[in-house]
Structures are given as C-alpha cells and as structure tokens.
Amino acid sequence: MNLDYVLPKRLIAAHPLPRRDESRLLVLRRDGGMEHSKFNRLGDFLNSGDALVLNETRVIPARIHGRLENGRETEFLVIRFSGNRAVALARGLKKLRPGARVDFGNDLSAVYAGRNGDEAELETSLFDEELAGWLEKHGRVPLPPYMQRPDDDSDKERYQTVFARKKGSCAAPTAGLHFTDKLLGDLSAGGVKIFKVCLHVGPGTFRPIDDASVAGGASLSPEHAEVSEEVYRGLLEVKSKGGRVVAVGTTTTRALETAAARGGGFSGFTDIFIRPGFKFAMVDALVTNFHLPRSSLLSLVCAFAGTDATLKAYEAAIREGYRFYSYGDAMLAL
C-alpha cells in the first residue's frame, strides 16, 4: 500500500503562526466531501453532547549536548529515565565503548553503559526529579529534524499544548497545538464535553514505515498511556446518548482504541499500530495535522478516513497551500 506523496518544501511549517487557532482546517467527510475552514471555527462542526478528547502529555526539553573524553561533542535525545538510568537517542554510537564518560555541564555527567539499536543507555549523576529539573532548566526543545532550524525561546511555549500537564513526551501531540483556552471554553459552553487522556509520545513517531509494516504484523515501539476508568465510562455514556467521540490527534486515538480493545481504562504500555482495515471501536471523529509520508501517523488517518480519500485531501491541501507537519495546519475527519 502506497502511503507516499510529494510535498513542496515551502509547505513545511518551520515556525508556528502568531495565534494557535488561526491555522486552517480542512474538513474531510466520510463521503469524500471536503470543506476549507479555520481552526477557530471547529465548534461549527461539533454538536452539543459530543466528547472532545485531549492528550495532556507534556514535552520534556530533552535534547542535550555532551562532550566525550576525546573532546568530541555528541547530541543526545533523552526518551525516558528512571533512577539514574537514562535511555537516549544519539548518533555515532558505534564509536562509543561502554564505560565512556560524557560531560553535559552544569553538574550533569554520565557513563555510557551500552546500546540497544540506536538507543544509548546512560548511567547519570542525577536521579529522577533532579534529572527532570536539570532537563527543564538546561535541555533544548526536541524539534523534529524536518524543521531544519535550532529551537528558540518561543518553542518552549509553542511546542506545548495549553493543556499539557504530565511530563513524558519527546515530541508534541501536534493536533493539540491549535487549541487556546478560549476555544476550549467556547466549545465547553456549547455543550461539548472535554475529556483528557495521556500518551507519552516516543521516538517511533519520527520513524518511517515500509509497505510490509502497513500490510500487517508489525507493531510500534511501546509508549506509555493512561485512560482512566472514569474517562472510559464517560465516553461510553456519550456514545450511548448519540454523541460522538472526537479524538484530538493520533496519539489520543491510539490510547482510546487500546482502552476499547482492553475493555476499560488502563495505565501501561501500548504498541498498537492502526493501519487500513482497522475497526474503530471508540473514535467517531478525528482532529489531526498533516503527517509525513510513509509514517504510522498517516497510516492511522488512512485507516480512519480511507486511504484514497485521505490522499486526495492531502493533494487538495497542497494545491491550496496548507502548512504541513508539527507547526502546520489541521484536518478534521468526520
């Protein structure tokens, strides 16, 4: 199955718009019909009694630079840590030997303990909350590589959703970046029920997939997610009354469909890979950004809205000059 398309580089959004909710919104209906709108008019397409589900994960500023004993500098992206053990993505790991010391400055150092694929295992000089605090103070925002620019101070705010609360992601749940407190308040005042779940976005979101993975069998790298039993039951009640469950983002969708498959709320890891042919049990509508070709995120959107309809919507978005990827515009699949 071909999940490829050609995107002009000028349509890759390297910076956010001045206002979050000023982004464009392409509305894609199940019958293939399309409508062009603005994100601040999202309420025009939702009904009183619908449920809007947000991912309240928070991005850790986990991109850090370390100096090796030979003086060479290496960039690490910390993806998880516990105690004084951290796992990070880094280049040039084949040249590192276990026991090598890395100095990150500002009282943080580490010993390289080995690697698992492209993941480095580090024994750090700081533990848990100390390390978390160090990253918040000294780490850099892990912008996706396709932005091709260094992060700046504005990214610390704009690469987080306004409802981000639980630290743990190495990438933003980008569909949520369009919301403002005012927009959420207006939706709630209009009768839309707001629910929150959490899925910590891991590095797998950047990795391309091949045709065999889309065809079946493969799973994604495990990511930690939480859907409370209260939220799960609340969403079932919404559906029982004729309301729709509107998932904000592919991460929210994966958390909700994992809960549905397990038959209730849960807290744990999920590796669910949603591909065309998947039967959705919880999600009725999807708010999402425009994703990279040959990605698991695009596979999920195709599974929800149909591959042909999705790729035609992408073609229309390109013709109309929509902005793509993390800081880009949005799509609502109904």
Image (cartoon, rainbow, N blue to C red):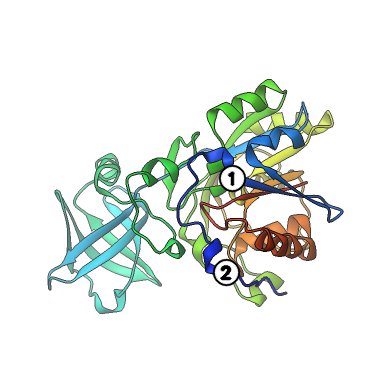
Residue at image x 68%, y 39%?
264
Secondary-structure class at tag 1: loop
Whether residue 198 is visible to the viewer of this picture, yes or no, is no
Q: Look at label 2 and name its amino acid.
A: Pro
Secondary-structure class at tag 2: loop
Residue 319 in picture, x, y percent from top left: 68, 63
Q: In which image quadrant can residue 279 be found? A: bottom right
Residue 117 in picture, x, y percent from top left: 40, 72
Residue at image x 70%, y 27%?
192
Q: Look at label 1 and name its amino acid.
A: Ser
Horizontal relation, residue 45 to residue 19: left or right = right
Q: In which image quadrant can residue 122 be found? A: bottom left
Q: Name the residue under label 1.
A: 23
Q: Residues within 10 Å of mark 2 (few under 14, many from 20)?
A: few
Along the line of sight, which residue is nearer the eye, 126 or 299? 299
Residue at image x 65%, y 72%?
4
Q: Name the residue under label 2.
A: 8
Quadrant into which the N terminus falls:
bottom right
Q: Residues within 10 Å of mark 1 (few under 14, many from 20)?
A: many
First along the sequence among labels 2 and 1: 2
